[in-house]
Amino acid sequence: MTPSKFMHQIESISHWMIYALVLFLFGSEVLEMFTTGDITVKNILTFFIYLEIMQMVSIFFETGKIPVRYPIYISMIGLARYIILEDLKFNEALAISGSILLLSLALVALAYRNKLVKSTGEKVDSI
């Protein structure tokens, strides 16, 4: 077995473990909601994070690559969840909102990177 095949198997096993753990966390969150009878915004935002992680892992299994935009989506949702759930001072909330804005600008830059690179004549891998 070549080192690259071995590393690919380790990656695949690790991604399956991540997928299984996210499914477990998702299930435990649903069980907690039904047990307590309480559905909150926290639960919904947590579900979005879990779904983004599952989608990111699914894309890895389909293509062998992880798109850069998915960790950015997860970060944005996590920061929004933090703003909503924590009792923040104005300056803290503003700083975190600025972080979300920077992440949004990064997504815009990723969306237009192919057009920018084509205009310079260079070739870029799709992420």
Image: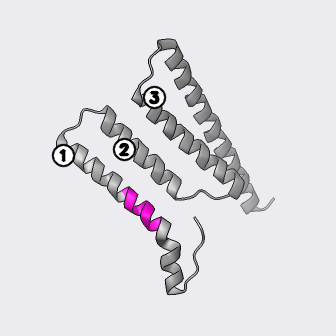
Asked if residue 61 lies left or right of residue 34, the reply is right
Give the x, y percent position of residue 35. Answer: 52, 13
Asked if residue 102 lies left or right of residue 44, the reply is left
Q: Disc count in the image?
A: 3
Q: At label 1, which amino acid type do we have?
A: Asn
What is the image's colouring? one colour
Question: Label 1 vs label 2: CA separation?
Answer: 15 Å
Q: Quick one: 65 or 52, which is closer to the camera?
A: 52
Mark nearer the N terminus (3 vs 2): 3
Q: At label 3, which amino acid type do we have?
A: Asn
For label 2, the SS is helix
Give the x, y percent position of residue 96. Answer: 29, 48
Give the class, few, some or many, for how many residues have Cα within 10 Å of label 1's Cα (few <14, many ≥20): few
The numbered mark at residue 43 is 3
Q: Which residue is mark 2?
A: 79
Magenta part of the chain: 103-110
The numbered mark at residue 91 is 1
Which quarter of the figure is the C terminus placed in?
bottom right
Q: Can residue 7 be seen in this snapshot?
A: no
* Residue 108, quarter of picture: bottom left
Queried whether the magenta region covers residue 68, the answer comes back as no
Give the x, y percent position of residue 69. Answer: 51, 57
